[in-house]
Amino acid sequence: MKRYKAESDEKLEIGEVFYTKRFVLTIDRTRCKGCAICKLVCPREAVSVKPAKKGPDGKTLAPVIDIDENKCDFHGICAAACPFSAITITADSQEGMPAVSKDVFPTLIRDLEIDSEKCEPGCKKCEEKCPLDAISVRFEPLTPEEQNERKSRGLSAGTEKTVIELKRDRCAGCQVCWIECPTDAVRVTKFYEGSIRIDRKLCPEGCHSCLDVCPVNALSLGEDQKIQINDMQCIYCGACLNVCPNPEALKLERTSVHHTPVESGAWNKGLEKLTSTQGLDRELAAVRTGKAREAIKSLKSTR
Amino acid sequence: MSEINAQAEQLRIGVFVCDCGLNIAGTLDMDQLVEFSEKQPDVVYVKENRYTCADPGQNEIKKAIADYNLNRVVVAACSPKMHEPTFRKCVEEAGMNPFLFEQANIREMCSWCHSNQKEDATEKAKDIISISLAKARLLQPLTRFKVPVTNKAMVIGGGIAGINAALDMANMGYKVYLVDNDESIGGHMAQLDKTFPTLDCSICIEGPKMVEVARNPNIELITFADILSVDGFIGNFKVKIRKNPRYVIQKNCTGCGECADVCPVEYPNKWEMSLGTRKAISVPFVQAVPLIFTIDKEHCIECYKCVDVCGGRKAIDLEQKPEEIEIEVGTITVATGFDIYEPYDDPKWGYGKYQNVVTALEVERLVNAAGPTGGRVVRASDGKKPKTVVFIQCIGSRDVNKYEYCTGFCCMYACKDAILIKEHEPDTEVFILYMDMRTPFKGFEEFYRRARELGVTFVRGKPSKILEDEENNLIIRTDDTILGEPIEIKANMVILSTAGVPKAGTDNLSRILHVTRGTDGFYLESHPKLKPLDAPVDGIFYAGACQGLKDIPYSVSQGSGTAGRAATILSKKQVEIEPIVAVVDPVKCLHSKANCGVCMKVCPYGAPSAPEHEPMVINPAKCHGCGTCVADCPADAITQMHFTDEQIFAQIRSALAEKPEEKIMGFLCNWCCYSGADLAGTSRFQYPTPIRVVRVMCSGRVDKDFVLEALRLGAGAVFVGACHLPNDCHYISGNVWMKERMDALQKKLTEEGMSPERLSISYVSAAEGLIFANMMKKMDQRMKDMGIAKIQEENAKLKPYIEKVLGRKGLLPGTGAKK
């Protein structure tokens, strides 16, 4: 059995190689934003965060994630929880997270839908504004049949149709596409819900590290040179928390998670770590209520 | 016949001087010895015999005891290590207490080693006889203790040796506790594919035995448990065991394995030599006994899927705590086995660096049909079958820089694995690079021939270097000593035949059991030839590789052998304990006044104990009779039965009565040095005569006062002979305390004006007869070089200090009370 770690600028790869099995974990460094949610949920504490550094232009760089190849069990809980889908697990060259395939951890529901028929012709705002390259828009000419079909439905005529390709695994729910869309073509829901606040008194003058690292531009500099939060865009990933010099200045918490259904002690622990004990209690209460409702329904239907 | 009461009556000693054919009579003047003995005080009967140990000689003794009302017997003949038990039994049959007998060694320590110095030897023999008489006069009758026996046995270690020991004892009708610290019994044999020289499938023959153990109503199997402490003594051991939590309830688990199916976490399986994985809840291998699953909490993410699927069986308990139990047994058999050396620390083999370099045990798992590759021997780098395989022998073994011993089974297992590879893939080229091919036992030479006939190439040479190429092939450079040329072999796979080593945890267990290990790290048996299964501690036995590396039939034999050894104790209702124990005088003991505790510190058996501020009590069943506490007691409050201070002082005074400056006063420990000196005589190594020997059970018994008294009486030199440090002492640590004591004394005496070499503190093993003889030669030469005058001058300088010390204790003759 051999364990290895290979580092490059583009990725971190760790692996466990047996005679007939090979587990590999890859962090795509271009996608990883240093939020360190993986470190939070890892049951073996295999993840560590290297301290934040400043780039050549003075901007703070996103913290770098490191994984101890001797501790990692390659079940992929980190990959399932990562908002940016930066982590991939392969077992024998097949991609997939054992924790998810064994129903022990859910996947985040990346609810992103764009009805391209509602798009303004020639509009690419969503693609332009998306900070995570989750949307690509192209225009294709309409065939005469398609043109007629559209006319019969009462839609505006035109010569092109908008074709939208969504890479949902990249979408972190910042909702910028929905904010910027001139029509109501976009539907997007956050999977991490929570709240974020800055204590102005404790926020150091002239520091804008949080702004530098925010992956979705949810933080900006106001006219008063103080940091401002755009609550609608924040995805509650916590990358800013990792670089804030004053731990009391930035208050960020997650309160709930939108995920696929799962019943697992490992998820309960993960949820507690991601949100809080109250967050866990709330979800369990909701599940219980849901089950009770189902039970009553089934009783009613048997009458 | 009632025992003759020796105390109230006047001493009537019988001396029996033995010719031993010509062994003694050929060198010593027997008439002089008889005449001398007749003149000694308290001697009422002297007889010369040709062979005292033979029936006629023994009958003479018995007759004399009856006719002459003897109440002490001294036989001047061979070494007591030879016939003390014989003569003790003889006098006991005549109605005398066996501990009123003393043997004077005038053969091994006189006639045999001084055969060309007849006159000096005869004078020495006279001294030897009077030394024995001095002790005999003060001997007291002693009774052997009887202790009850718990007729249950414990076997520690469930490998093939332990399994056999347990089955044999159980089938004799004894209850046996078989304890193993692993999840399953089976040991290393369960990991093998086939066994040499028959190529039997290993688990096929061991599996049924494992199941038999589980089913046997007399065997209680306790697995995944550690031994915490062992208290007690032969027939009466109390063992504390901690059962480690499996997080699975043993009696509810059916071994169905549904939990492992749903478990999401995999981790490297140590039992598969980390070649394959196991789930966080799993068994190490499918034939595990007991078939109970275990959760490794390090890897378990507590998803509870296993609990869900187990359902109504409710076998999983994630809150399970360790459980401590205490078991009482009469005997303990240690069968803990061995480990395999993994040469990560030796860079020249590339183990751990080059992917296609593996150990032989890893190959066993590869070639095993139930192993991680389904029986295919393939390379780790690319999963392909190797076309050229090279075995390298003696990795770590026979190496003064690593393990000096020869492991003993690697030549055979290399042939075996080579044959298996050849039989699976006949086109494979197989080389075995060896130093020697050691295949001595039944069927082994034929097996070696079989490997050769299958086309395995044997090259005599040990490689100096292994290099790797870009395709993970290995380039081996070695000397072919038969061709007389260096050669280079390109191998697709290299298999290292690594050494067997003492199992991890042996040092801890040996401490718990109060047993010693040899310098090689394996448990030290009581006698390598005649008692290979006994530990020096009564009631503890060794079976299998833990006592020394061995293969399966040898381990099985030892397992059965220890069952027999244990049965000699378990079959009795009581056992007798030798009465040569230490006894504390409660009046003198300083524990009551000052919480002293020195005896507790120096005793390796935990024999002395007492509540605070009460006089120490020594448990006679735990006391092994080394006498270390006796010598170290600051208040001289402890006496050793049969080796009292009084007796030893009398022996010293008798030895040095005449011409002390020409004599060496020797204190030799029974197990090593005395035996070594005997061996010098048996081997007929000649040496000068000055030494006069007092035998003690352990060098730890040698009190500072003995050395001082010898010097006070004018001895030319003093010799203290002990077992080698650090591991050889029969009583574990007696020699360590002796060294501390004597080093300090030597320093002090040197300050007071003694030439340091006049007190010789030496270490001689029972095998070092020649070394003892040479030591005697050296000491004699030094004494001659110094000359009597200088010796007397030094002794005079020491006298004030010695008389002060001995006088303070009341040990000077004519002053104060003798003990």
Image (spheres, coloured by chain):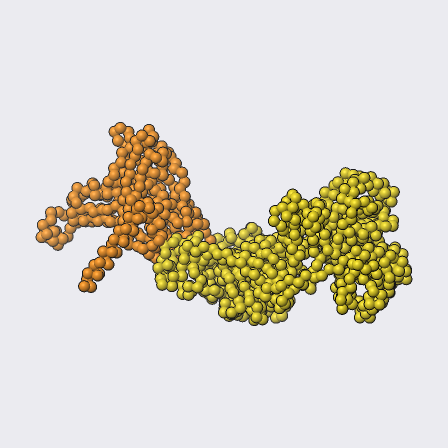
Q: Please name whichever residue, B549 or B113, is drawn nearer the observer in this view of the structure.
A: B113
- Left or right of B293 in this view: A82: left
| Relative to A302, residue A151 above or below | above
Is residue A34 visible to the viewer in this orientation of the structure?
yes
Q: Quadrant of residue B36?
A: bottom right
Quick one: which chain is orange?
A
The image shows residue B145 at horizontal and vertical percentages of 68, 61
Residue at the front extreme of this rendering: B8
Question: Which residue is found at the position 30% from the left and 54% from the top?
Answer: A262
Q: Quadrant of residue B621?
A: bottom right
Is residue B485 visible to the viewer in this orientation of the structure?
no
Question: Which residue is found at the position 78% from the left and 58% from the top?
Answer: B7
The image shows residue B642 at horizontal and vertical percentages of 74, 56
| Relative to B559, residue A85 above or below | above
Q: Please name whichever residue, B246 or B275, is drawn nearer the observer in this view of the structure.
A: B246
Q: Please name whichever residue, A28 or B65, is drawn nearer the observer in this view of the structure.
A: B65
Give the tally of numbered discs: 0
- Left or right of B133 in this view: B318: left
Give the quadrant of the C terminus of chain A.
bottom left
The image shows residue A247 at horizontal and vertical percentages of 36, 36
- Left or right of B183 in this view: B75: right
Question: Which residue is found at the position 63% from the left and 67% from the top?
Answer: B572
The image shows residue A29 at horizontal and vertical percentages of 36, 44
Question: Which residue is found at the position 57% from the left and 70% from the top?
Answer: B173
Quick one: which chain is yellow?
B
